[in-house]
Image (spheres, rainbow, N blue to C red):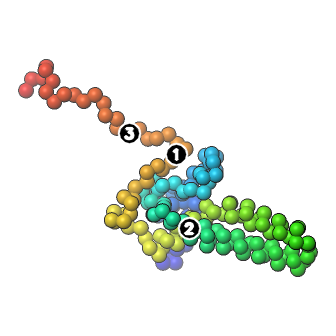
Amino acid sequence: MTAKAGAYFTRAARLRCPVCGTKPIFPPAHAVRRPFDWFTPLDGCPRCGYAYEREPGYFLLAVWVIDCGFGSLLGAMIYLTLEFRADPPWFVLLPSIILPVLVFDVLFVRHAKALFMALDHLLDPHVKGGDDDRGNRPRDIRPWEPEPPECKPGPVEPCESPGRVR
Ligand SMILES: [Zn+2]
């Protein structure tokens, strides 16, 4: 259990799939085109097929408890440090707390979601092939890369072509 937990949380710290640890959970920073891309994980792991978001609202706890929780701790530490060391006026104190916390929350949200996935995978492993696994197949795995070639239906040879001899 401890070794498993260590592996899962190490993968989460590297923003990698909690199951195989090789593929990324989020699009790389250079592929982020809009804010939505930064916050939203890919649908699943292209290597092992693990679906990252099990159900709608899956990451609510990750955002509101882990991300905002650590952000609040940071805000409290900044407040205590400033209040007892410098005692600035409120109009300096307030932005000095809020701005770093907002920046932290945006930068940490990916790790919060990855940590939540690691914890969830540790406590309630996602069984592939189960009835409630949404098929456990990613829909859109790597949107920043070209789609893999698919089998396109070509011209179908008629079953009974006129020249075919039976
Ligand atoms: Zn994987």
Residue 101: image quadrant is bottom right
Residue 130: image quadrant is bottom left
Image location (x, y in percent) of residue 100: 77, 64
Residue found at x 43% / y 51%: 139
Residue found at x 73% / y 63%: 102
Look at mark 1 in the image and give the residue it sits on: 143
In the rendered structure, which disc, 3 or 1, sits on the residue that comes first in sequence?
A: 1
Q: Is residue 139 left or right of residue 158?
A: right
**Secondary structure found at label 1:** loop
Look at mark 3 in the image and give the residue it sits on: 150
Q: Are marks 3 and 2 in contact (CB under 8 Å)?
A: no
Q: Amino acid at mark 1?
A: Pro
Q: Is residue 8 visible?
A: no
Look at mark 2 in the image and give the residue it sits on: 60
Separation of residues labelled 2 and 1 (CA atoms): 23 Å
Separation of residues labelled 3 and 1 (CA atoms): 15 Å
Residue found at x 48% / y 78%: 1
Report the front residue among 96 and 16.
96
Separation of residues labelled 3 and 2 (CA atoms): 35 Å
Q: Is residue 19 visible?
A: yes
Q: Nearer the viewer, mark 3 or mark 2?
A: 2
Residue found at x 15% / y 24%: 161
Image location (x, y in percent) of residue 72: 71, 73
Q: Amino acid at mark 2?
A: Leu
How many neighbours does mark 3 have within 10 angstroms: few (below 14), some (14-19), or many (20 or more)? few
